[in-house]
Amino acid sequence: MHMTDTTIIVRYFGLLAEHTGHGEERLQFPTGTTVQHVRGSLCEKHPALRYLKYRVAVDTALCTDDKVIDGCTELALLPPFAGG
Amino acid sequence: MSTTEKTTKLKNIFIDGAITPERIATSIANHQTKTGIGAHDIFLGQVRADTIGTSIVSAIDYTAHTEMANTEMQKIREEAFARFDLTCMHVYHSLGAVSAGGICLFVFVSSPHRQAAFDACRYVVENIKERLPVFGKELFAEGGHQWKENR
């Protein structure tokens, strides 16, 4: 592991947990990795993600694909909300 | 909202299973000492036995990103207090299975006057549905499921 790598916990919720077969996984990415890159990498592991609708939250805040994950601890994949 | 209320730790809105009528009744009773209040508004979300094709929903199994949902709920709470003349506000949401007919969301807002209570209640409910990362697995009576999606 490179000293500046980011280790991030990827959490899958609802339908996504069902399709990926994971609640969460711990993954390492090099410095400067964006959410877009993480998504691409996750699609290779879990092809179902290519056609499922979801949003990404990093450290509990929704974010866009250009967000850099350096120093972050958690990346959550959130399918459509169904509260209430 | 007062400064002291703002600095309190994040409230947990989640409770296991259905929200009981007794909890709602107790919550109403707890406000009888707050005599500055002139109007309450309450919203109760109830699990509906939807028919999907030939299947009937018998329960919804709720999961959530609870830390994120509680953080987002705190923001909605602060927005509601900033926008409306509220005295207090309470929100509960179920986690786990709630059978059709059970209460899964309880929003309770209180104000000196009715207009603020009506407006705040709608604001809070709409924002909960749109912004809280809560997920619902609709369980069918004869087995199988589908994932609910708010419209």
Image: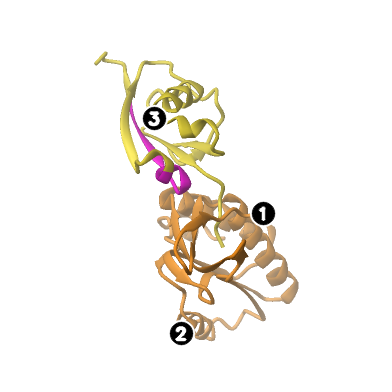
Front one among B17 and B39: B17
Q: Amino acid at mark 1?
A: Arg
Residue A75, picture quadrant: top left
Secondary structure at numbered mark 3: loop
Image mark for residue A72: 3
Q: Which image quadrant is residue B127 in?
A: bottom right
Task: Give the image location of residue B19, x and y in percent.
Answer: 47, 74
Asked if marks 1 and 3 touch (Cβ < 8 Å), the reply is no
Instruction: Compute the Cα span from label 3 to label 2.
Output: 42 Å
- Quadrant for the N terminus of chain B in the image: bottom right
Say which residue label 2 marks: B22
Chain letter of disc 3 in the image: A
Inspect the image, locate mark 3, and give the three-letter code of the amino acid beneath it: Cys
Q: Please give the range of residues in magenta.
A: A7-18
Q: Secondary structure at mark 1?
A: loop
The chain displayed yellow equals A
Instruction: Name the image quarter holding the C terminus of chain B.
Output: bottom right
Q: Is residue A13 magenta?
A: yes
- Colour for chain B in the figure: orange
Q: Chain of mark 1?
A: B
The x and y percentages for residue A17 are 40, 44
Q: Amino acid at mark 2?
A: Glu
Task: Estimate the spatial distance between the alpha carbons at disc 1 and disc 2, rounded to whole Å.
Answer: 30 Å
